[in-house]
Image (cartoon, rainbow, N blue to C red):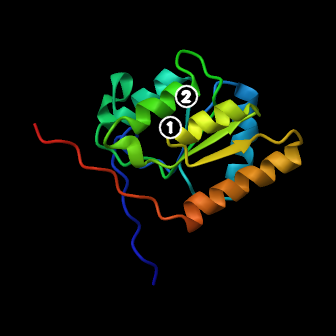
Amino acid sequence: MTAPRTRLPADPLTRPVDILLVEDNPLEVELTLRPLRELDAGNRIEVARDGEEALDFLLGRGQFRQRLGAPLPRLILLDLKLPKLDGVEVLRGLRANSRTCVAPIVVLTSSTDPREVAQCYQLGANSWVQKPVSYEEFSRTIQTIARYWLGVNQSPTPAPLPVS
């Protein structure tokens, strides 16, 4: 006998998300999603194409207001070079919010600037990973990150929303 499956909420905006990928480059999005799909773990992955969209999604603002109070992703993969708001501003905004300050954030970037590395860790990034050049190495890196953060790591529970 198999265990009953948990029904997802009818509204797709309020369904739990396992991974939020914050990346504006369509090729980088595809190169990141492919190895995640190869894991075939049934993880729900969403993509935010700029920093503002990422904050709106995670904070339940604008077009994502139905997500206010929805479970946080178990992993946020955050690029630094983003339109509208860069990755540093996204990181700063998430860590300043009492609910999202505990979200696991891995900065996934091509930058090697030690000042950016230090700044992101000071702002509360959980990890900094430089994007490997070869696709094979990039794919292995993405799968290793996902296996750790979704399979080994115990994610914290965010603070409840204040009652008005």
Who's the residue at 66% across and 37% down the image? 117
Amino acid on which disc 2 is placed: Val
Residue 82, by quadrant, is top right
Residue 41 visible in the snapshot: no
Q: Nearer the viewer, mark 2 or mark 1?
A: 1
- Mark 1: few, some, or many residues within 10 Å (few <14, many ≥20)? some
The quarter of the rendered structure image containing the C terminus is top left
Element type at marker 1? loop
Who's the residue at 39% across and 72% down the image? 4
Who's the residue at 50% across and 25% down the image? 89
Residue position marked by numbered label 1 in the rendering:
123
Q: CA distance from mark 2 to mark 1?
A: 8 Å
Considering every residue shown, the one lying at the far top of the view is 84
Amino acid on which disc 1 is placed: Leu
Residue 102 visible in the snapshot: yes
Is 95 placed left or right of 113 in the picture?
left
Q: What percent of the width, then of the height, locates residue 150?
A: 56, 60
Q: What percent of the width, then of the height, locates residue 92?
A: 46, 31
Residue position marked by numbered label 2 in the rendering:
88
Count every numbered label the image shows and give the total.
Answer: 2
The quarter of the rendered structure image containing the N terminus is bottom left
Q: Is residue 83 positioned above or below 65 on the image?
A: above
